[in-house]
Image (cartoon, coloured by chain):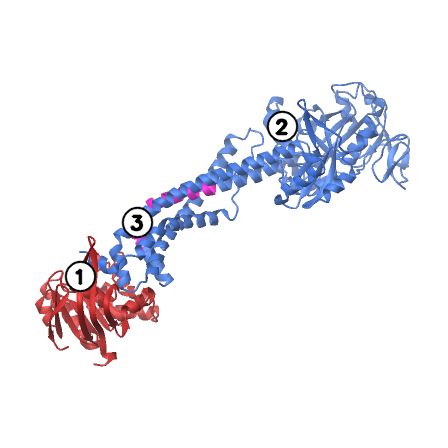
Amino acid sequence: MTAAAIAIDASGLSRTFIADQRPVHALREVSLRVAAGESVAIVGRSGAGKSTLLNLIGALDRGYQGSLRVFGEEVRAMPDRALSRFRNRQIGFVFQAFNLLPNLSVGQNVLLPASFGTELGHGERVERARYLLGEFGLADRFGQMPAQMSGGERQRVAIARALLLQPPLLVCDEPTGSLDGETAAHILGVLHGIQRTHGTALVLVTHDPQVAQSCDRVVRLDKGRVVDAVGAA
Amino acid sequence: MRLGRLLSLVASNLRSAWVRAALAMVGIVVGTGLLTFFIGLGQGLREKVLERIFPVNQLELEPRAVQIFGTEQILGQEPLDDARVRQVAGLPGVVRAFGKQKSSFPARLWGGKELLGYNLFTEAFFDGIPAAVVRGELEELEGVSAKRGPSAIANGDRCELDLDCAAGMGCGDGVCVPIVWADRFVEVPEVVLPCGDGDRCPQGTTCQQGRCAKAGESAPPQRCVLPAAAGTGRDLQFDREVGELAQPCADPLGFCGMPATTCGEGRYCAADHPETRLGWCERPLPAVINPLLLEVFNSDMARSLGAAPIGSLAVLFGVRFHVALGDSYFSKDADKHRQQFKQAIVVGFSRKAPELGVALPREVVRHFNARLKGNAAAQAYDTILLDTASNQDVPQVIVEAEKLGLQLSRKSRAARTFGTVVLVTSLALVLLAAVVLAVAAVQIAQTFAMLVHERRREIAVLRARGAARIDIAVLVLGEAAAIGALGGLCGGGAAIGVAELVDRAAARFLADVPLVPQGFFVFPMWAVPLALAVAIAFTVAGALAPARRAMRLDPAAVLAES
């Protein structure tokens, strides 16, 4: 696997928090490589360190030990502004709770990543947002508020927001956790479609075995360690 | 973050929390409202009250006095002569300086019939001031005041008096002609100043045939004779016959070949002294009065005299009155042969004129001081009037003047005291507004702390989607600035509105109170922008700590919250 084809390269990754003046080791010596265009499911029981790993991979948390390179960039070494720009361009997030901004319309939510610097002109951004919403069957919902939508629709809006700047890495935290089976299957299909169509690396945390099985690889965490990895590495 | 996007986010956030934003804004509105209100009031008091009564950059100096047994005594001072005036004029920051001489002789004054329907009689006091010192003010007040009502111009161009003519017009040969009143106040007016051997004449004139005349002036003034009924001293005291002095008089001696019936346009027959029927044809003495006199008359005197208040200064232009120089209602021991009976005409208004008196050309007062009280009374000035280049020069000029043995006159001291009181009061009130704003800033801090706490998930999402810490801080501070700007505009606007109401109420309910200005407020151009800037500064300051907390939020920890 060439350096350019590697989306995530974690080596000896540890994360320790202080709780009640005691260290809590959320991740211990985790090593993980994810190739561009690969989908990886991270599974494990609650408290196993799944979300901690996802936050590190998503460059939201820099307080780790070891090495973490995302598209060749050592996350810890980047100053806040550069890291924010990196997140903006390279990583798309999809959350279990959708996390749409309630004060903004659907269109404004989708356009949110473009607020923080992009070469795209206003017209091009809006056109792309409309295209994405159209792809997800929400073409006529551009001006609606998120509160007027169902859970599945909101999640599709969240995915559209994550894809606006066409990031090469999509990080999803229980993307189907709040959805019914049919909607969950649809959303999963959308995510894998993106992965295949755009060569986007997909890392998702899930408790759902079916979701995990849909990925190229499944990484199981327990007590902060990788205990099992199924699939091609 | 892009500015347009920032504004859009700020607007949507404020819309979603408008009740809380409005509540947070209340303190800012009150604070900036008070600030603007007090700025307007302070500036108004300075411009409409203080500078109207005592112009700040105009000082009056007098010889330094010391208190001895409760009385002010001037000890060992050199007289205030032209040399001292030049010395003061040379002080740094002084634009010009003039000597002022008060009348040291008694005088009576009566007139006003043409305006009030009957004559008023009073003891008179004169200040002699140079024409140059009031010239600008005369022109300014003439320009502002010369707006006569429709009744004054009802007769078209025909007139008998200046009062019959419209603004800027005077009566000449029965028709209205353009007139500049200020031009009539000149240092040596066309007035016959009688003199005898040893009497002092104004500079540039000498005593020729019993009157002061310019060197080389050949034609003597027209001699006239008074009506027979007015030819005795008794008649000239109180009764209406004195009014006849103003009527055209004969020229029985045929001086200068003038027609033997009149003194000519704008002239009248002035009595030489009470016991003669002879007089000189001359123009009335140009008189300047203090505009405050009109307010004192309207507020304190008109009602008790049963007279209607005088609407504006404009109607006083051209009003004539009689003066008996050297005579008094209180004392009858004056030398009748040195007295003079003349007319005076109001040619303008100046704050340098005495509040209860009349300003005449300095050389006229000086001449009669010498004639009626001896040359010594005309030697020195009583005070020195000076203008400074700016208000900032005033303190230094006072210090330098003290080195010359001079001090501020009572009037100037009162002005400075009043000015200081206004300044200190204004500052205290502005400080009060600042305290209100500080309290408002604390309220803003609390509100934004709550907003940041409530929106921490949104902030975390923004961070996840590419917002840098500084973007989050700018967003929070932008919301604060928007609240500040809106609050500042509301506060400033409300202050101006309340000030307008106060002014209207004052105009309605305080109309009879003397010296009450037409308005108490003056809002400088910078008042509302300043209120806006202060409001933004205080709200942004209040939001600094919440913004700091917001930018330091750990997005991973917040997003991990269920």
Compared with residue B76, is residue B6 higher up or lower down, i.e. above or below?
Answer: below
Q: Chain in blue?
A: B
Q: Is residue B507 visible?
A: yes
Mark 2: secondary structure: helix
The amino acid sitting under disc 2 is Phe
To which quarter of the image does residue B31 belong?
top left
Residue B145 shown left or right of residue B274 in the figure: left
Q: Mark 2 points at which residue?
A: B297
What hue represents chain A? red
Mark 3 and 2 residues: CB-CB less than 8 Å, in contact? no
Please identify, in this view, whether the residue under mark 1 or under mark 2 is nearer the observer.
1
For the N terminus of chain A, the quadrant is bottom left
Q: Residue A25 carries which label?
A: 1
B13 is within the stretch colored magenta = yes
Q: Give the CA distance from mark 3 to mark 2.
A: 62 Å
Q: Is residue B183 visible?
A: no
